Amino acid sequence: MSICVLTGDIVGSTDLPAAQQRQVMAILGDAHHEIARDGAGFFDTYRGDGWQMAFDRPALALRFALFIRASLKEADDTFETRVAMAKGVGDMPSLDLQSAPFIASGRALDAMPRDVLFAHADGGALQGAALLADHISQGWTQAQARAIRPFLHPAASVTQKDVAEATGVTRQAIGQALEAAGYGPISKALSAIEGQAE
């Protein structure tokens, strides 16, 4: 089956207290659990501040990366992680961690410039989309992340009214936060990438 692998590490982990490092990893684990379809996924941590995830929907890799960023920033807008994406062949749940997509994702992470936090190992248009999405989303505030996160879920079927009621703010505030977060162009870009891959 086709899978995508996301490999990352916590940005500025050496400056974070141990409790906050554990909090970041817990958020990552919760995000993975939330978006892994029917439990079809993989999540593990390594070297204290590193992590890997795998999913059975490679077309959604950038959506997953953005959902992870929104999850972190919703908790604390200083929390950040690098994310390197790769797609390939693997068997869920019996994954070979030395298989091509895991290796490609790890190498893409190692090759990232310091000012880049998203990368796609396939290069080309997917890398271009990852770079633009990274640039737009790096500046998300906590309020923007809280507003956009539900819409980034792969099974999203929420409205601005739903999110407003769930978060205790007005629908107008949600709309303003989504606009400031760049949700319109991000949503269109994700739809184009995911539609082409179907």
Image (cartoon, grey):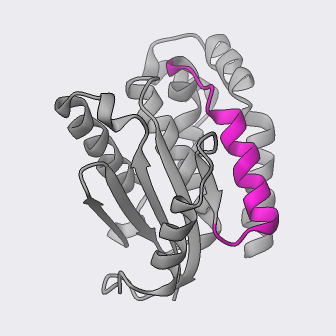
Which residue sits at x=25%, y=30%? 20
x, y percent for residue 189: 79, 51
x, y percent for residue 58: 59, 72
Which residue sits at x=38%, y=26%? 75
The secondary structure that most of the magenta stretch takes on is helix
In the rendered image, the vertical position of residue 163 relative to residue 32, given as above or below: above
Work out whether residue 5 or residue 60 is closer to the camera in this orientation and state it.
Answer: 5
Determine whether, in the image, residue 107 is placed left or right of residue 125.
left
In the rendered image, the vertical position of residue 128 relative to residue 143, given as above or below: below
x, y percent for residue 52: 38, 63
Determine whether, in the image, residue 182 is placed left or right of residue 97.
right
Work out whether residue 121 or residue 73 is closer to the camera in this orientation and state it.
Answer: 121
Which residue sits at x=24%, y=50%? 48
Query: In which image quadrant can residue 97 be found?
Result: bottom left
Work out whether residue 192 or residue 54 is closer to the camera in this orientation and state it.
Answer: 54
In the rendered image, the vertical position of residue 91 relative to residue 13, given as above or below: below
Which residue sits at x=63%, y=39%? 115
Determine whether, in the image, residue 25 is placed left or right of residue 2.
left
Residue 130 in the magenta stretch? The answer is yes
Q: Is residue 72 visible?
A: yes
In the rendered image, the vertical position of residue 168 relative to residue 110, given as above or below: above
Residue 30 in the magenta stretch? The answer is no
Work out whether residue 173 or residue 144 is closer to the camera in this orientation and state it.
Answer: 144
Q: Is residue 33 visible?
A: no
Which quadrant is home to the C terminus? bottom right
Residue at the far left in the pictured view: 19
Query: In which image quadrant can residue 44 be found?
Result: bottom left
Q: Which residues are magenta?
A: 121-142
Determine whether, in the image, residue 118 is placed left or right of residue 102.
right
